[in-house]
Amino acid sequence: MTNKGGLEGVIVADINTSYIDGSKGKLVYSGYAIEDLAETTSFEEILFLLFNTRLPKRKEYEDLRRTIAANAAIPKAVIDMMKSLPPDTSAMAVLRTAVSMLSAFDADAENLTDKEAAKAKALRLTGQITTICAAWIRIAKGQEPIPPRKDLSVAENFVYMMSGDEPDATACAALNVYLVLLAEHGMNASTFATRVVTATGSDLHSAIVAGISALKGPSHGGANAEAMKMFIEIGDVDNVLPWFEKNIKSGKRRIMGIGHRVYKSNDPRAAILRRHAEALAESSGERKWLDIAVKLAETARADDYFVQRNLYPNVDYYSAIVLYMLGLDIDMFTPLFAMSRISGWSAHVIAQMGGRLIRPKANYVGPHDLEFVVIDQR
Ligand code: ACO
């Protein structure tokens, strides 16, 4: 028996966090259409929804927001470790290492069975990942990190910790939409990785490290950074067509941020992020990157190759423009994805706890019945 690889179409769990209809371009979080949630909810509400399968009441939301902010500080030893790294270390490698290290400072890290303890750990990690991301932006530039504030939301704290200034409302709103849109997405590669680790009985930090590791790849979360590098390489809207001919029509490369294992029509998150990229381009007067992205997407969608294979811009395509226009270094794009997806990962980890070991089978295609010869006679 041979197979196409990639476990395509294989169902590995029943979930209640998100539903995707890839042919209709539909994404739903626990019953709510993403279009209804994106502009009107905060990331913390989504976290509550994913953990409880219902939206929070005002007090529940405030409590959750306060809990995350109150636990967002990271130990000095983790800051010192980050300062000891070469400044050009991949930000995803920094995040992966810092999250792994944090487990040593979490008194409940080795509590492997209590789901309430896992929820509390996940909330701590949500705030701490935000702090790690903002701290690395400063440490990599030789600046001192700024500790989190207890009165701010995840989006606000991140914006505040980047500069130390009072967080700008427009930037926080755009970042909040991004965090809401990226929070959860079914059995994607990084989520599956967290589930595989959890199903062995391992701990939440280990599972999240696995998620971060899987997200880092350019076929998954790393695509937002690769998409922006590609827009910069193109450099000007007039270069789109020759660049497309040379790199894509020749079959040499893929367009990063286009195509998806599940969406065979528009990714609804891409449409929302495109609107935000438009708004940011409008308010800043800098349209160049968005114009390149739009022209490249239109060029691809007018090409038979992309039409026949149902390849559309995915979430990483326009989010690259949004994050760039928010002033983030490209290297920080994928950590920002992790800052959001910690919510979905954690919900999956908690659901998977106590579940059966995930252990698929491989199809052996090697030789049989070979005669064994000892090493010196081969
Ligand atoms: N540009 C050009 N061709 C593409 C692209 C692309 N971006 N994506 C897929 N294709 C082509 C493939 O070459 C293949 O063609 P073939 O049938 O002639 O061999 C066909 O479309 C199917 O591609 P697969 O790689 O088999 O599809 P798969 O479901 O495994 O891949 C993936 C999905 C990895 C996302 C792919 O579309 C891709 O590499 N996209 C670019 C990277 C990217 O944007 N990743 C982020 C995904 S979203 C996320 O993870 C958050």
Image (spheres, rainbow, N blue to C red):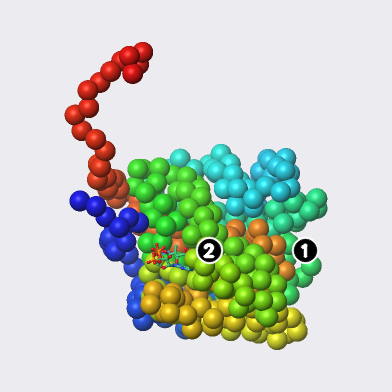
Query: For residue 129, which quarter of the picture?
Result: bottom right
Mark 2 burial class by Cα count in 10 Å: few <14, some 14-19, many 20+ = few
Whether residue 94 is visible, yes or no, is yes
Residue 307, horizontal then vertical, whole percent: 42, 79
Which residue is depicted at the point 64% across and 64% down? 229
Q: Give above or below for 368 relative to 253.
A: above
Label 1: state its secondary structure: helix
Which residue is depicted at the point 57% across and 48% down? 96
Q: What residue is pinned by disc 1?
A: 163
On whether ligand 1 comes within 8 Å of the CB at mark 2, the answer is yes
State the count of labels. Answer: 2
| Along the viewing direction, whichever of 91 and 264 lies nearer the viewer | 264
Where residue 253 is drawn, which disc sits there? 2
Amino acid type indicated by mark 2: Arg
Quick check: which quadrant has ligand 1? bottom left
Whether residue 69 is visible, yes or no, is no
Mark 1 burial class by Cα count in 10 Å: few <14, some 14-19, many 20+ = some
Residue 124, horizontal then vertical, whole percent: 55, 54
Where residue 178 is drawn, which disc sits there? none
Q: Give above or below for 31 relative to 163.
A: below
Q: Give above or below for 175 relative to 162.
A: below
Residue 52, horizontal then vertical, whole percent: 40, 67
Which residue is depicted at the point 53% across and 58% down? 218
| Along the viewing direction, whichever of 341 and 310 lies nearer the viewer | 310
User: Label 2, label 1: how many angstroms apart (C-alpha)?
Assistant: 37 Å
On whether ligand 1 comes within 8 Å of the CB at mark 1, the answer is no
| Along the viewing direction, whichever of 142 and 114 lies nearer the viewer | 142
Label 2: state its secondary structure: loop
Which residue is depicted at the point 77% across and 63% down? 163
Sooner in the amino-acid sequence: mark 2 or mark 1: 1
